[in-house]
Image (tube, helix red, strand yellow):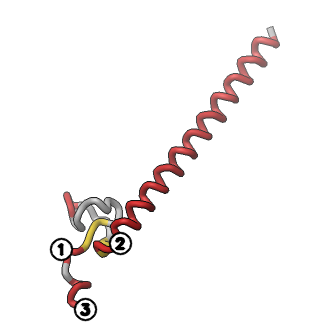
Amino acid sequence: MWRLFNMDEWLCEDHPEEEMGHDGCDGAGIPKEAQMFMLVMQRRNAIQKYNNCKWLYEDMIYGLVKRIEELENAT
């Protein structure tokens, strides 16, 4: 049970590559054993965020292209 309270073995939940409490970050602590899992989750979330942005911008560009075509046909 002592291991659960050893703060040297804890990492930041928001930044799993850093120790808990780094640079005044208030991210919750996770055990060092969970580092790989948290890094995988961080990577998965970054990929999902990239894909969401990519789809958003593709939709915006498609909408602009359609609007330009409408304006060209109107004149």
For the residues labelled 1 and 3, the Cα–Cα distance comes to 15 Å
Check disc 1 and give the amino acid type.
Asp
Q: Position of residue 51 (x, y in %)?
A: 56, 45
For the residues labelled 2 and 3, the Cα–Cα distance comes to 17 Å
Q: Is residue 22 left or right of residue 39?
A: left
Q: What residue is shown with label 1?
A: 8
Q: Nearer the viewer, residue 69 or 9?
A: 9
- Viewport quadrant of the C terminus: top right
Residue at x 31% of width, y 62% of height: 16
- Figure quadrant of residue 65: top right
- Viewport quadrant of the N terminus: bottom left
Check disc 3 and give the amino acid type.
Met
Q: Position of residue 73 (x, y in %)?
A: 81, 12
Q: Earlier in the sequence, mark 2 or mark 1?
A: 1
Check disc 2 and give the amino acid type.
Ala
Q: What residue is shown with label 3?
A: 1
Residue at x 28% of width, y 72% of height: 32
The residue mark sitting in front, 2 or 1, is 2
Secondary structure of the residue carrying numbered label 2: helix
Q: Is residue 36 left or right of residue 41?
A: left
Q: Of all residues shown, which one is farthest toward the top?
A: 75
Residue at x 73% of width, y 22% of height: 67
Where residue 34 is drawn, which disc sits there? 2
Q: Earlier in the sequence, mark 2 or mark 3?
A: 3
- Figure quadrant of residue 13: bottom left
Q: Position of residue 44 (x, y in %)?
A: 48, 56
Q: Nearer the viewer, residue 57 or 70?
A: 57
Q: Nearer the viewer, residue 63 or 39?
A: 39
Q: Position of residue 59 (x, y in %)?
A: 66, 35
**65 above or below 13?**
above
